[in-house]
Image (tube, helix red, strand yellow):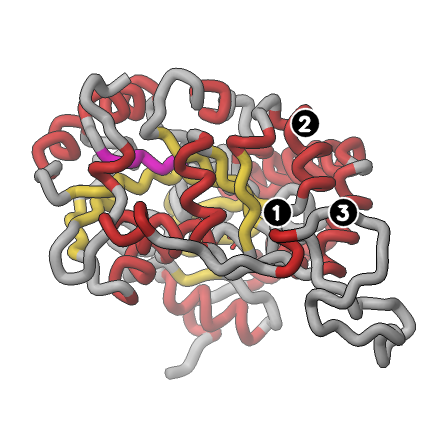
Amino acid sequence: MSKTFDLNKILRPHIISLAPYSSARDEYTGHVGIFLDANENPYGSVTEEHYNRYPDPYQAEIKQKLAPLKNVSIDRIYLGNGSDEPIDLLTRATCTPGQDHVIILPPTYGMYEVSANIHDVIIDKVSLTDDYLINVDAVLQAITPKTKIIWICSPNNPTGNVMQPEAIRTILENFDGLVVVDEAYIDFTETPSWTQHLDQYPNLVVLQTFSKAWGLAGLRIGMCFASPELIRILNKIKPPYNISLPAQKELLKGLNESGKKDEMVADILKERDSLCNMLAQLSLVIKVHPTDANFLLVQFEDAKAVMDYLINEAIIVRDRSRVHLCAGCLRITVGTQEENEAVIESLKKYKPENITV
Ligand SMILES: *Cc1c(COP(=O)(O)O)cnc(C)c1O
């Protein structure tokens, strides 16, 4: 590990001493009794399902099920309202506005930059290499005493590839701030998760989500795995009841169905292969980038025209053609067999003159 990492040097001083909001459910955690402590409605709800009670602020039942599934102890787990919430909280906990820096590695997920901008945090960009890998020397050179977080997305969005483990290891060992590895797409790759190295690296933070492989994007639940010390800080600064009761109930049911998740992932991987092969055979496709995620970054002769043509066919993909190192590229999520075939059939009919501007 980094020999001099000290969480207290990374956190903003007022966050260390902050006294958190103490909710009614923090002060009394028993389950039986007459609950007159939280100003709830005692009769029930206007809806059929009853939601008149506040949810568990720390989602204990969920974490009990999740810990063995992820092979991570409960005190290393934080659950947020999507992964976007821990992204925001990590930025706020560590970076003093107008003063501190974060490093991002474009092309990558947009929220690291947006979160830094919201909080007036200075962004240092270190481009990935032409083959979308981490330029370790450039990252190490970009680190300053004011750098608090390095954001790494692996498998990376929008490029789809996994980042070199040795590069991440070198950064972890040579940086005294937080190294966040966003593993939103970890279920779609054979590459092992960084969660299994949390013991070794107190500056490592791993993000995962229920939005992709688990098919629960609408519930808004993201996972953050880190040292127990950092998890305590996130719990201290989070909105008290950040995961709603229906979301917690649905997720508890969903966690019993990890077999179903595995089946869907297997189907998506099979579809990914066939979509990749079919796209590669089209003459208008220049390149299908290799992927470890549930989407393909595809380079076209004229991405903008293909995008407009597909919209006209009621097929919506993501235009990444103006993104750094992604010129000419559209990002296509792997759909069902029928959806993927529809995309291919449409693209086969595409003629450049189809579009009149
Ligand atoms: C989709 C995605 C997420 C997930 O965000 P949620 O807020 O959990 O839905 C996180 N990181 C990356 C890189 C993603 O592509």
The disc label shown at residue 105, or none: none
Please identify, in this view, whether the residue under mark 3 or under mark 1 is nearer the observer: 3
Residue 179 belongs to magenta span: yes
Residue sitting at x 51%, y 61%:
239
Left or right, 251 with reference to 292: right
Q: Nearer the viewer, residue 206 or 22?
A: 22
Residue sitting at x 35%, y 21%:
201
Q: Is residue 240 visible?
A: yes
Instruction: From the image, tell me which residue sits under label 1.
Output: 58
Residue sitting at x 61%, y 72%:
314
Image position, residue 39 (x, y; %): 71, 73
Instruction: From the image, tell me which residue sits under label 2.
Output: 69
- State the extent of the magenta-drawn residues as a range: 177-181
Q: Dot 1, crowdedness within 10 Å: few (<14), some or many (≥20)?
A: some
Q: Secondary structure at mark 3?
A: loop
Q: Nearer the viewer, residue 251 or 20?
A: 20
Magenta stretch prevailing secondary structure: strand
The N terminus appears in which quarter of the rendering? top left
